[in-house]
Image: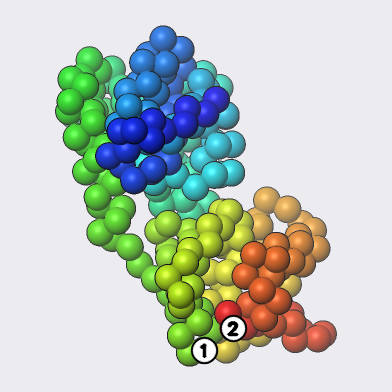
Amino acid sequence: MIYPADTQRSTADQTRLLLVEDDRETADMLAELFVSEGYDVDVAFDGHRGLHLGLGRRHQVMVIDRMLPGLDGLDLVKRLRRVGVTTRILVLTALGELGDRVTGLDSGADDYLVKPFEVDELLARVRALHRRDLADAEVLPLGDGDGGQLDLRRHEVCLADGSRVELSLREFGLLHALADGPKRVHDRSHLRERVFPDTSAESIVDTYVYYLRRKLGRDVVRTVRGRGYQMGTL
């Protein structure tokens, strides 16, 4: 379920937020609240759907309930972190003991808020997470010269003209792997193991090279015949 932002009251610069909450009344209330603050909100009512949305779309902030059906909230956070999702995450929970808070933060969450909570505090914490996301931006040069940079936190390519191109998680992972060693020729087996560990088919590398070229131009990835792929130019 997607709640588009109220463009009349956009205080969050159209930031995309993922809300994972199994209580539908609470989820509807929180979604409407975030939308009124200017967020584009994706809503999942269980952990597995939350994982699907978290991997399939880029979000700047996630708000995740701890007690979820199908996949516990902390297990969801761990799985997202395991595959390289760096989005700022706030965990909501009724478990407020010190040990519970420590466990939540150690799982990979950036903040932890105990229910019941004050709405103003929740919104302030989400705003703070978004500010941290913006302040901690890291970039990696792409290719030779001033062709562009890879934004490591927002999973975007920043082009020389100032425009940005959003990447899926796997597109980002592949481009990151190539940009990490721009002079190296990466064989398909290495790229498959690093970026696509959940599949044994090396052809998936070729598929995502095609996706990157479609978004960024044919020269962004160089084919070295008989050896593999290398970082190209924008």
Up/down of 149 relative to 59, above or below: below
Q: Are marks 2 and 1 in contact (CB under 8 Å)?
A: yes
Image quarter where the N terminus lies is: top right
- Badge 1, how many Cα within 10 Å: few under 14, some, many 20+? few
In the rendered image, is residue 215 in sight?
Answer: yes
Q: Is residue 200 left or right of residue 21?
A: right
In the rendered image, is residue 180 in sight?
Answer: no
Q: At which x and y percent is residue 208? A: 70, 62
Displayed quadrant of residue 95: top left
Image quarter where the C terminus lies is: bottom right
Q: Amino acid type of disc 1? A: Asp
The local secondary structure at tag 2 comes to: loop
The local secondary structure at tag 1 comes to: loop
Q: Residue furthest front?
A: 8
The structure residue drawn at horizontal position 52% and vertical position 89%, both measured from the top left corner, is 144
- Badge 2, how many Cα within 10 Å: few under 14, some, many 20+? some
Q: Earlier in the sequence, mark 2 or mark 1?
A: 1
Q: How is the image coloured?
A: rainbow
Up/down of 34 relative to 130, above or below: above
Q: Is residue 135 left or right of residue 224?
A: left
Q: Is residue 211 left or right of residue 182?
A: right
Q: At which x and y percent is residue 78? A: 45, 41
Displayed quadrant of residue 11: top left
Residue corresponding to mark 2: 233
The structure residue drawn at horizontal position 73% and vertical position 72%, both measured from the top left corner, is 188
The structure residue drawn at horizontal position 38% and vertical position 43%, both measured from the top left corner, is 15
Q: Amino acid type of disc 2? A: Thr
Camera-side residue: 25 or 186?
Answer: 25
Residue corresponding to mark 1: 144
Q: At which x and y percent is residue 191? A: 66, 69
